[in-house]
Image: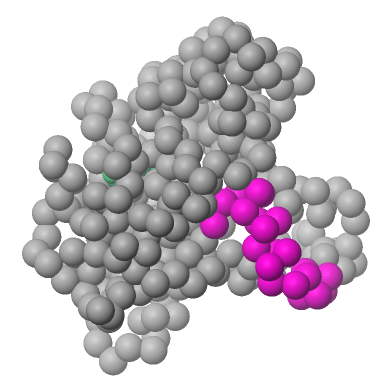
Amino acid sequence: MVRPALRALCGARVHARQRPMWPAVLSLTVDMDDTPARVHVPLQDPNQQYLLQCFKDLQQSSRRPLIALDFGCGDGDLVGEARRAGFEFFGAEAYYGRSEYEAESLARTDPDAAPCILRIGKDGRVPVVDCYFDFVCSNQVFEHLRDLRSVVGELARITRPDGVHVHVVPTLEQWVDGHTGVWFVHKIPRGNLRRLLAAAFHRLRWVNFWKPDVSFEAWWSVFDTFLADDTFYRSWGDIRWSLTQFFTIRHRGPEKFAWMLQRTPSRRRSNSWRAIRWLWRLVPEPIAWRLLLHRSGVTVELRARTH
Ligand SMILES: C[S@@+](CC[C@H](N)C(=O)[O-])C[C@H]1O[C@@H](n2cnc3c(N)ncnc32)[C@H](O)[C@@H]1O
């Protein structure tokens, strides 16, 4: 029972064979990716599955077809899946403001999503008129935004007054950096100590994108730069401040976690998993919220403020 619990709390390891989600900016991670040319695979990321479910629930309770946006949609997996299901779903991307990442990402982009990905301008504008979307979501994007407050303002502009947002937001409080898989690396300033910690985890092979033929130096040169130049972890307090300028917040993390436990694949439907699901229901909401804050950040639902 302890092992599945640890796995649930620490999150699954990202293996080198998995599609690289984050720092494809540099070709090293692309070399690490053994996946053949783009094929349709069912949506695999549990966060993305949850976001799609949130949209479906909202659509079901609405009398008209809703228009949705996956902000920072990456390769467009969620957008493609949603469009194949018949939903009016769009993506928006800024590609870290780097043309080389844009080219790499577009080459991997889901063909059903590609025509529906809006290019965010250098000024941060999403090219749609005000109040366009009924639903806006994002998965692990906020920690890559240099100026969070202005992006939140732009998200408020493009959302209808009765629109709903759901965002999965990594925070500084997390124990594990989701990009490298190294514990506490994002809390240490760039330099020798950070490098030493990363080297120790790499030695133990307890990192994301580990491959036998990729040395620590090569692996770290990618992530060291990525963490320094493209990743801006903020505390939940800072993020909340930016969000509350435009939105009211409801936490959905504990509910999301319960939903994920419920959907555990049948091969894991052992007694221990059943026990974990049962125990989770007994955890008081504030404790559940805090545990999840340290595990993976927050999942928030936002609605426009009525002034
Ligand atoms: C960790 S990836 C997540 C991608 C996707 N949401 C997913 O779940 O696979 C972060 C994404 O944020 C995008 N991004 C970076 N800066 C951005 C910005 N200023 N505006 C919008 N998206 C941005 C990156 O291009 C990248 O696709």
User: Which quarter of the figure has residue 75?
Assistant: top left
> Horizontally, is 41 left or right of 75 in the view?
right
The residue located at (64%, 19%) in the rendering is 198
Q: What's the residue at 56%, 7% (across, down)?
A: 217
Q: Nearer the viewer, residue 188 or 225?
A: 188
Q: Quadrant of residue 147?
A: top left
**Nearest the camera: 173 or 96?**
173
In percent of width and height, residue 192 lies at 60, 9
- Between 219 and 293, the residue placed more toward the observer is 293
Query: Is residue 9 found left or right of 39 in the rendered image?
Result: right
What residue sits 18% from the left and 45% below the top?
124
Residue 173 is covered by the magenta coloring: no
Classify 27 as above or below 269.
above
Q: Which residues are magenta?
A: 278-298
Image location (x, y in percent) of residue 70: 33, 57
Callout count: 0
- Position of 230 relative to 238 (above/below): above
Q: Quadrant of the C terminus?
A: bottom left
In the image, what residue occupies the spot 30% across and 74% down?
A: 304
- The one nearer the camera, 207 or 142, is 142
View extreme (bottom): residue: 63
Judge left or right: residue 290 versus residue 270: left
> Can residue 165 be seen in the rendering of this structure?
no
- Can residue 168 be seen here? The reply is yes
| Figure colour scheme | one colour
Q: Which residue sits furthest left?
A: 129
Q: Quadrant of ligand 1?
A: top left
Q: Give the image location of residue 231, x and y in percent.
A: 43, 33
Q: Position of residue 85 (x, y in %)?
A: 36, 70
Q: Is residue 224 above or below residue 40?
A: above
| Figure quadrant of residue 167 | bottom left
